Structure formats: C-alpha cells, structure tokens
Image (cartoon, rainbow, N blue to C red):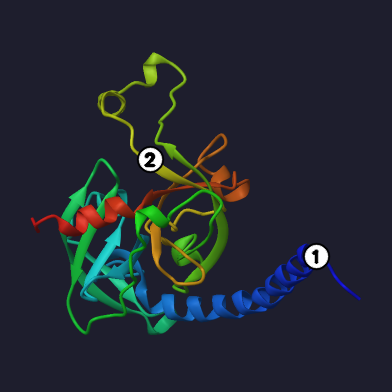
C-alpha cells in the first residue's frame, strides 16, 4: 500500500515524541540527584540559642564551589541585640547537615540578590543558562527548603513552567502605601522577572530555578504572590511565584568583592 509521505512523517513525529517522554522522565530524577549537593540552607548560628541554627532561606553553589547565591532579603536580617550571630549555610541534609560560616562579598539590593563566600571543601557548582535560552512556556524546576526547619533540612523539589517574562511591579492600593523605598523603585526603569506557574513557600527564597533536563540555572526564587494576609502563602497559596532572571546573577558574579 502506498502511504502518502505527509502521513508517514506525522506518524514518525508521533513515534519520536512517545520515545522521548520516557527519556525525559528518566532524566529528571538524575538531575535532582545532581542538583541537591549544590543547594544549601542559609541561616545563622548562635551557640547559646536553642536550636543553635536559625533558618532564613535557601542558597545554591556556583563558580568555584565556595560561592553561594541567595536573596538579599534572606541575609539582610538584623542580628540579635544581645549576642553575636554567625551567618552561614547548612551543607548536606537532615541531622548530618554541617554549618559553614559565610561572609557577604557582594549584594544587589535592587534585584534582591546576594553573593556569599564560604570556606572548606568546594561543593558541586550549578551552571548558568544563557538568558537568550529563557522563554515563556519552558518547563522549570526549583529545589530548596520550603517552610525551612519545620520540615527538617531536606531539599525539596517542585516543578512548573515559565508562564510570563514580565516587568517587575509592586502594586499599591493608595498613596498612603507609597513609602520612600517604593517611590524609589517606581522611579527606576522596571526590569523583567520570571513569573512561574508553580507554588513556592516561605523558605524557598533563594532557591535555584533550573532546566529539568540540563540543571542549568534560569533564575532564583525571590517572592510569591500572596492573596490576603501573609499566612495565606501557606494555607492558600496562589500558585504564582516570581524569580530573578539569570542575567542579574551573572552581573552580580562579575562585581568586585566588598
């Protein structure tokens, strides 16, 4: 029987898709396994406190294996008034997690990014994607510590898609909400952020957003859209999460240390 070439090509394309799906499903667990050693918990250590380690957010290893990227708001927290706290990261997971002191070497307040430096044995570093490869509709994953110490220090992975690449906005309901920081933001030219169709939680701040196949970083989680009170971010999440794109991470890595 003579089958038209157009039909043959159609069935071949369908066959290729069916064969590709199991491959992607098999690749993703391998990607997660490779990513986990690069994802750290960011917090502070205080010997006289119980527990001694206080969790602030998530970070991930890049570059030389001793450089950590996280959010500026994760490390811009006031230290305890009566005793010194040591900023650092928890490496590993669970009870075997090891606290390593860290210093802030560069910070980008506008884009909510911070670069830390730790000591010790270098850790596996995550590779950066090219910003030109970031597009709406791409599948993404992010790994971090949702809800922080409440779930223990175990990396958790979520999936979603890039639903929009959109200018950053900070909507306010009336002029009484326009404090100096908000006014300064409005005066600056807006930059784009990645809007994700995915659910992140408190503790995911600083989590790497990456390609599920290659593990290359597309951006870093920095906030979620909250419906109503802050508590609803846990009880009734919006499913809308924002991430700072990779190009701003690359710019921060080029900045000289403080």
Helix, strand or loop at mark 1: helix
Helix, strand or loop at mark 2: strand
Pointer 2: what residue?
192
Pointer 1: what residue?
7
Q: Is residue 245 visible?
A: yes
In screen coordinates, is 47 left or right of 205?
left
- Image mark count: 2
Q: Position of residue 81 (x, y in %)?
A: 19, 51
Residue at left offset 16%, top offset 57%: 254
Residue at left offset 43%, top offset 71%: 215
Quadrant of the image containing the C terminus: bottom left
In screen coordinates, is 22 left or right of 70?
right
Q: Position of residue 108 (x, y in %)?
A: 22, 47
Which residue occupies the foreground of this view, 185 or 55? 185
Residue 29, quarter of picture: bottom right
Give above or below for 132 relative to 43.
above
């Amino acid at each position: 029987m003579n089958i038209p070439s157009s039909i043959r090509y159609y069935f071949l394309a369908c066959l290729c898709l069916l064969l590709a799906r199991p491959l992607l499903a098999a690749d993703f667990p391998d990607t997660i396994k490779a990513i986990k050693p690069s994802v750290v918990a960011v917090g502070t250590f205080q010997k006289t406190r119980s527990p001694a380690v206080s969790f602030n957010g998530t970070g991930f290893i890049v570059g030389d294996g001793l450089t950590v990227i996280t959010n500026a708001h994760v490390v811009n927290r006031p230290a305890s008034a009566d005793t010194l706290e040591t900023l650092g990261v928890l490496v590993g997971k669970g009870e075997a997690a090891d606290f390593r002191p860290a210093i802030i070497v560069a910070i980008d307040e506008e884009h909510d990014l911070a670069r830390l430096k730790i000591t010790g044995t270098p850790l596996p570093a995550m590779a950066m994607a090219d910003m030109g490869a970031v597009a709406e509709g791409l599948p993404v994953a992010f790994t971090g510590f949702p809800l922080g110490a409440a779930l223990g220090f175990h990396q958790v992975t979520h999936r979603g898609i890039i639903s929009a690449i959109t200018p950053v906005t900070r909507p306010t309901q009336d002029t009484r909400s326009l404090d100096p920081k908000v006014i300064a933001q409005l005066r600056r030219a807006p930059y784009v952020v990645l809007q994700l169709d995915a659910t992140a939680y408190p503790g995911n701040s600083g989590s790497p957003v990456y390609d599920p196949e290659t593990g290359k970083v597309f951006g870093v989680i920095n906030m979620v859209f909250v419906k109503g009170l802050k508590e609803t971010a846990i009880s009734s999440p919006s499913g809308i999460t924002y991430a700072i794109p990779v190009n701003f991470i690359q710019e921060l890595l080029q900045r000289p240390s403080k």
